[in-house]
């Protein structure tokens, strides 16, 4: 075929492709990355289709290919188109989701001579032109950067342009190489015979000197190969100084050995075998297995919703379903809400599929990510584990996709285009590739459960915990009305019953989790004299006080100032701290329970590469009695010594103007509840609230997903909210509030005109109105919310200028 439809990396390209001619001699495939001329630029593009005829009369030619093999699979090409149409994103933005990390690297330009240059008169050349031509002919090609260094940037570029115009030289382009630094690890090698080392060890032992050196020598003498320093330190129970001492005695040497980077350290992971399934697990796996077996061309396997309370054995089913898929020559993708928070899940996969697990982690360097991408594409792994973007991993022979904790909001990309939901993308990808999807949750998204009820998805239920021994049923939950505490004169953060329970647990050598969904020491500060509340300069939100650094921080944009000594408006010194965050909670806990060891875990303390794991290990090893944290700690941790979970305030999310506030609160509470009593000890949860009668709190306290769902779905139906309709949120932002509002009003009129002229009856519109946070990073924001059934198709017909963002199926507030 002579023509290619190319998705071009330019903001102008929007949702369309461009036709290019394929020059003779160049072979181009669907999914391949190419260089194409676009205006006066040379841009990257991905071939989405080949055809006999161009879509326009005049086409330009593809300049060259960027990578020899296609980067997108045929399924991914279709998926990218679907994402662009469904979420109204630019086509290249959708394509870019699937490109290898760092694809949008710098372009390096090379200049080379032509094999059979036109005749030219040397004397007609300037000195500079001659210099460049000589250089170009003396080598195969010369980097433009090199010329720029020698001649100056402007001059080099103009000379090259002149030579190209005269047909004496050509440019070619390459992507800058990804730098992957190899990783080396120190190894210890004996410089003497093993027998000699043993003799020396024995001598040291006899003398009773340097016992540690003796045991390290002994340890090394038992190994035929050099031993990694880290392993030797563990094996001989010594530190590096001991090894250094042996080095200086000339008995041992240190060698740097290059290792392949493995995001998982298998040293502490022992291989494991499948568990014998309980009967509910068995029948769930049986359904999944039979649809894996049926997969063939043209068969669309069902989407499974695996609904099981925490610790009901869902992960064990993922593991065994994956094993089934692997047996059939397939591979899997496992999605988790946040990779840093799921070390235990990764460990379990690594122990069941040793060295066959790829982990996509945003904390890997670009080079490491690139390496991992290549190895995945080459079929190196049975399974890829990652957060939402891992759905785009180039996993070949895809047979199984698992979305764990499918209700989590992190699965929606809400902050940049394409604003996709991983669940919907996964279901589409599965349909295209014939893979089986398992959505797993203890508290499924109300919309997901609705689909399962209607039979769109196949529901698999695990109603009970798989208990390692008897006992350990679901924890007992008590709801405490904070208004009663106030009446009784208790103004502390801890109700009387929570106080008693904490003291008792700590005294009994058990562990406690205290949960508060807010960082910082105080949520805002207010002048007692004039009432001023300090706000961010750029966002319309109150600044939060952080005792670390004595600073005020904007939780939206990270704007930070030091805590003022006096009120900036009236100069009064009477400044009051209001509201509570985790820092404040920790402080109060230290006064109330001075004998307990505390550990705070929120995003303020976990910035480094391993800190989540470190926090987890510390708490698991019982180096602290009370763990204080935000929603981070509510994620799937398995901490057997925890017998008490205290929810300091269940109300934090309840009063937001969002129809999903109830669902969100229910999910969060249920997840927190699941942290108690995971071991053989009995668990207890105390929920503190000012609205104990709220249905979300009531039903969560009863572990009643069905109760919650019935109430919630009734409200949704009554108020005509999703899943009974679909939403789209259009936000316009501008530094000038009046202009912003005017543009929003204009858009409203256009939408209404378009709707009426097309006679669409099921489309309604709310707004325009300011967004929940009216101003963000210095820009005012107005929104229009649409309800209807065919929103993407409708909106695709309307010209929407720059400055608008469109969110199809939004979650949460804009
Ligand atoms: P979930 O993913 O639903 O939270 P898990 O799969 O993590 O549940 O199971 C909870 C605990 O029970 C884990 O420690 C797991 O190893 C164990 N477990 C799961 N299935 C079984 C089984 N069939 N027999 C024994 N133990 C099991
Ligand atoms: Zn004041
Ligand atoms: Zn701000």
Image (cartoon, helix red, strand yellow):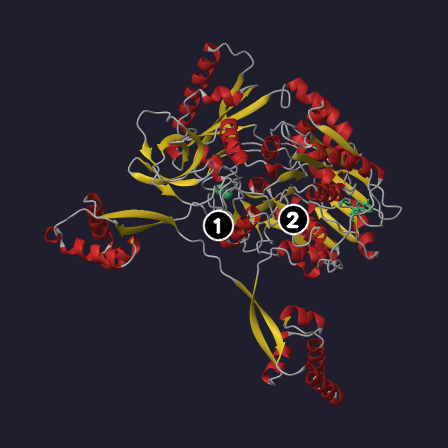
Q: Secondary structure at mark 1?
A: strand
Q: Residues within 10 Å of mark 2 (few under 14, many from 20)?
A: some
Q: Which residue is mark 1?
A: 561
> Which residue is drawn at the image coordinates 13% and 52% (left, top)?
125
Q: Which residue is mark 2?
A: 341
Whole-percent x, y for residue 547 in the image = 58, 53
Whole-percent x, y for residue 10 in the image = 38, 36
Whole-percent x, y for residue 739 in the image = 38, 27
Q: Residues within 10 Å of mark 1 (few under 14, many from 20)?
A: some
Where's the N terminus, which quadrant? top left
In the displayed orientation, state which residue is furthest to the left.
123
723 shown above or below 326? above
In the displayed orientation, state which residue is furthest to the right.
470
**Who comes first in sequence, dot 1 or dot 2?**
2
Q: Secondary structure at mark 2?
A: helix
Which of discs 1 and 2 lies nearer the camera? The answer is: 2
User: In terms of depth relative to the viewer, which is nearer, 492 or 243?
Assistant: 243
Residue 336 visible somewhere in the drawing = no
> Which residue is drawn at the image coordinates 51% and 51% (left, top)?
370
- Left or right of 6 on screen, residue 143: left
Residue 570 visible somewhere in the drawing = yes
| Rendered image quadrant of residue 488 | top right
237 shown above or below 61? below
Whole-percent x, y for residue 530 in the image = 52, 40
- Left or right of 547 on screen, residue 11: left
């Amino acid at each position: 075929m002579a023509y290619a439809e190319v998705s071009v990396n330019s903001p102008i390209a929007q949702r369309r492709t461009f036709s290019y001619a394929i020059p003779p001699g160049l072979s181009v495939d669907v999914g391949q990355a190419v260089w194409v001329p676009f205006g006066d630029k040379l841009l990257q593009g991905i071939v989405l289709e080949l055809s006999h005829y161009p879509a326009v009369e005049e086409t330009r030619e593809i300049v060259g290919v960027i990578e020899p093999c296609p980067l997108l699979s045929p399924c991914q090409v279709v998926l990218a188109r679907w994402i662009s149409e469904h979420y109204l994103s630019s086509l290249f933005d959708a394509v870019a989701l699937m490109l290898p990390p760092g694809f949008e690297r710098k372009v390096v330009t090379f200049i080379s001579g032509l094999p059979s240059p036109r005749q030219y008169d040397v004397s007609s050349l300037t000195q500079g032109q001659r210099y460049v031509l000589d250089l170009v002919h003396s080598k195969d090609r010369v980097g433009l950067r090199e010329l720029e260094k020698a001649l100056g940037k402007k001059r080099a570029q103009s000379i090259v342009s002149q030579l190209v115009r005269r047909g004496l030289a050509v440019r070619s382009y390459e992507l800058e190489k990804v730098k992957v630094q190899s990783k080396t690890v120190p190894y210890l090698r004996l410089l003497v015979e093993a027998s000699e080392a043993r003799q020396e060890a024995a001598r040291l032992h006899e003398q009773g000197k340097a016992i540690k050196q003796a045991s390290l020598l002994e340890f090394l003498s038992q190994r035929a190969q050099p031993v990694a320093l880290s392993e030797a330190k563990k094996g001989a129970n010594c530190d590096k100084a001991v090894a250094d001492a042996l080095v200086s005695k000339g008995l041992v040497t240190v060698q740097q050995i290059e290792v392949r980077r493995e995001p998982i350290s298998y040293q502490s992971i022992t291989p494991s075998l499948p568990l014998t399934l309980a009967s509910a697990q068995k029948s769930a796996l049986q359904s999944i297995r039979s649809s894996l077996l049926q997969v063939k061309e043209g068969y669309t396997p069902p989407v499974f919703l695996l609904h099981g309370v925490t610790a009901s054995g869902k992960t064990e089913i993922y593991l065994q379903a994956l094993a089934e898929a692997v047996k059939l020559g397939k591979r899997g993708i496992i999605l988790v809400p946040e990779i840093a928070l799921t070390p235990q899940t990764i460990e379990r996969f690594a122990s069941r599929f040793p060295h066959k697990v790829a982990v996509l982690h945003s904390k890997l360097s670009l080079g490491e990510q690139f390496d991992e991408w290549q190895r995945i594409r080459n079929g190196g792994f049975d399974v890829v584990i990652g957060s939402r973007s891992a759905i785009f991993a180039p996993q070949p022979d895809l047979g199984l996709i698992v979305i764990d904790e499918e209700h989590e909001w992190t699965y929606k990309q809400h902050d940049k285009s394409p604003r996709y939901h991983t669940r919907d993308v996964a279901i589409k990808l599965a349909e295209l590739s014939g893979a089986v999807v398992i959505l797993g949750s203890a508290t499924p998204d109300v919309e997901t459960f609705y689909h399962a009820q209607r039979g769109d998805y196949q529901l698999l239920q695990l109603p009970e915990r798989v208990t390692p021994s008897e006992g350990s049923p679901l924890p007992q939950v008590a709801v405490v009305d904070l208004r009663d505490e106030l009446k009784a004169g208790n103004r502390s953060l801890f109700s009387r019953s929570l106080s008693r329970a904490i003291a008792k647990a700590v005294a009994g050598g058990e562990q406690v989790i205290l949960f508060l969904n807010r960082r910082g020491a105080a949520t805002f500060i207010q002048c007692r004299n004039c009432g001023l509340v300090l706000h961010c300069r750029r966002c319309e939100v109150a600044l939060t006080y952080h005792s670390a650094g004595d600073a005020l921080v904007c939780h939206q944009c990270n704007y930070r100032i030091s805590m003022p000594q006096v009120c900036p408006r009236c100069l009064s010194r009477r400044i009051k701290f209001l509201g509570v965050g985790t820092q404040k909670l920790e402080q109060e806990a230290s006064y109330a329970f001075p004998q307990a060891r505390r550990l705070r875990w929120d995003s303020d303390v976990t910035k480094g590469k391993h800190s989540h794991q470190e926090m987890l290990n510390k708490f698991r090893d019982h180096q602290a009695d009370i763990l204080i944290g935000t929603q981070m700690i509510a994620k799937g941790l398995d901490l057997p010594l925890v017998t008490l979970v205290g929810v300091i305030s269940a109300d934090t999310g309840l009063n937001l103007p969002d129809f999903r506030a109830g669902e969100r609160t229910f999910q969060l509470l249920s997840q927190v509840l699941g942290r108690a009593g995971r071991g053989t000890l009995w668990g207890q949860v105390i929920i503190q609230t000012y609205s104990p009668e709220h249905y979300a709190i009531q039903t969560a306290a009863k572990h009643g997903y069905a109760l919650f769902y019935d109430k919630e779905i009734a409200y949704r139906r009554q108020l005509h909210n999703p899943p009974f309709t679909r939403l789209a949120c259009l936000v316009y932002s501008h530094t000038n509030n009046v202009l912003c509002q005017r543009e929003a009003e204009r858009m409203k009129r256009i939408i209404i005109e378009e709707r009426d002229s097309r006679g669409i009856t099921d489309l309604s519109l709310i707004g325009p109105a300011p967004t929940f946070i009216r101003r963000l990073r210095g820009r005012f924001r107005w929104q229009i919310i649409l309800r209807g059934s065919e929103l993407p198709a409708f909106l695709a017909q309307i010209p929407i200028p720059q400055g608008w963002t469109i969110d199809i199926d939004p979650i949460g507030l804009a």
